[in-house]
Image (cartoon, rainbow, N blue to C red):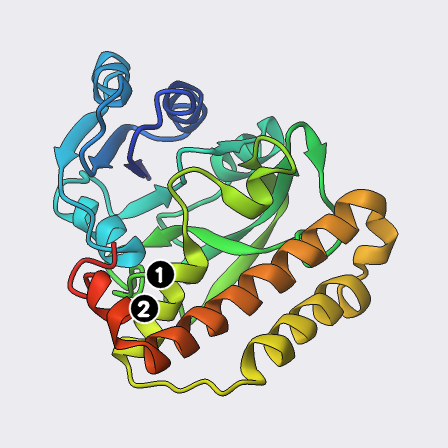
């Protein structure tokens, strides 16, 4: 059975060619949903034969589901622009009999990397995620952050995709275009969630302990420690910002809660 590809993009000229070329090893058509790139992302994707759909960003899962009205086939492979299929994953997908498959989705192992370094601790591996799914039965959840495919029946594929998460350690703390703690604080505030004076410290400490101790970040040397610290800082800032919204109306008025994304 043929497979369609789905990628969402915003200023991904550095990544988009390698991502599309990776997907072309198993996909018969590829849909790129672009949310207003000002670089050469659209030009490169078009040159490589992808269908480009222009859609202002709606949030993670909602944006990925936009492609489903444009893909040509029932089974869809969804990758982020900074993800790649390994040759082993390509071979594993090619060997699947999707015509007779009874599952709704297939989960892949994901190698998350900082630079060229594969991070195997801190919960970063195997980091399974469903990336190949039957659109007659399931799709991404319609949420704005941390969306996943809502498949009830899945099968694990024991092969990897590669995720170039961060170019270097510095991006763990300030990756361009990503303000996860600020977005999360806005979402929590809009939902009416509350924080107290102890919340930032407690959640920050819990995040560090989870990453460094329970997810064995201590086995990852400097990278493991840095990831645990960045997780703690992001969690601390999320609740500190939420607390600020509660306490300081002047700050709340500065932010547009109708335009979180």
The correct choice, above or below, for 132 with respect to 150 in the image is above
Query: Toward which corner of the image does residue 210 lie, by quadrant?
Result: bottom right
Seen from the viewer's position, the closer of residues 246 and 62 is 246
Q: Quadrant of residue 144?
A: bottom left
| Secondary structure type for disc 1 | helix
Instruction: Tell me the distance, in whole angstroms, between the alpha carbons under discs 1 and 2.
Output: 5 Å
Q: Is residue 18 left or right of residue 45?
A: right
Number of other residues with Cα within 10 Å of mark 1, as a class: few under 14, some 14 to 19, many 20 or more: some
Q: Position of residue 75 (x, y in %)?
A: 31, 47
Side of 156 where 131 appears, left or right: left
Dot 2 falls on a residue whose secondary structure is helix
**What percent of the width, then of the height, locates residue 41?**
28, 22
| Residue located beneath label 1 in the image | 183
The residue positioned farthest toward the top in the image shown: 47
Q: What residue do we see at 20% from left, 68% from top?
A: 253
Whether residue 143 can be seen here: yes
In the picture of the structure, the residue carrying the numbered disc 2 is 186
Residue shown at 19% from the left, 40% from the top: 71
The N terminus: image quadrant? top left
Q: Nearer the viewer, residue 77 or 38?
A: 38
Q: Is residue 124 above or below residue 1?
A: below
| Residue at 63% in and 71% down | 204
The residue lying at 38 percent from left, 69 percent from top is: 185
Can residue 149 be seen by looking at this rendering? Answer: no
Q: Give the percent coordinates (x, y) of residue 221.
A: 85, 46
């Amino acid at each position: 059975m043929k497979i369609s590809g789905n990628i969402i993009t915003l200023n991904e000229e550095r990544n988009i060619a390698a991502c599309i070329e990776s997907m072309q090893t198993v996909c018969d058509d590829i849909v790129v949903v672009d949310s207003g790139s000002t670089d050469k992302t659209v030009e490169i994707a078009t040159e490589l034969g992808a269908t480009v759909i222009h859609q202002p960003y709606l949030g993670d899962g909602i944006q990925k589901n936009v492609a489903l009205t444009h893909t040509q086939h029932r089974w869809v492979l969804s990758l982020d622009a900074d993800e790649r299929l390994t040759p082993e994953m390509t071979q594993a997908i090619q060997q699947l009999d999707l015509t007779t498959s009874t599952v709704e989705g297939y989960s892949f192992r994901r190698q998350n990397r900082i630079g060229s370094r594969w991070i195997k601790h801190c919960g970063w591996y195997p980091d399974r995620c469903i990336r190949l799914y039957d659109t007659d039965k399931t799709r991404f959840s319609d949420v704005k952050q941390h969306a996943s495919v809502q498949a009830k029946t899945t099968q694990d594929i024991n092969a990897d995709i590669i995720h170039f998460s961060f170019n270097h350690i510095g991006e763990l703390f300030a990756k361009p275009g990503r303000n996860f703690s600020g977005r999360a604080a806005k979402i929590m505030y809009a939902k009416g969630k509350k924080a107290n004076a102890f919340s930032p410290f407690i959640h920050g400490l819990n995040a560090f302990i989870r990453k460094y101790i329970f997810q064995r970040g201590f086995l990852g040397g400097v990278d493991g420690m840095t990831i645990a610290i960045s997780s703690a800082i992001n969690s601390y800032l999320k609740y500190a910002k939420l607390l600020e919204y509660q306490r300081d109306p002047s700050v709340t008025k500065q932010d547009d809660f109708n335009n979180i994304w």
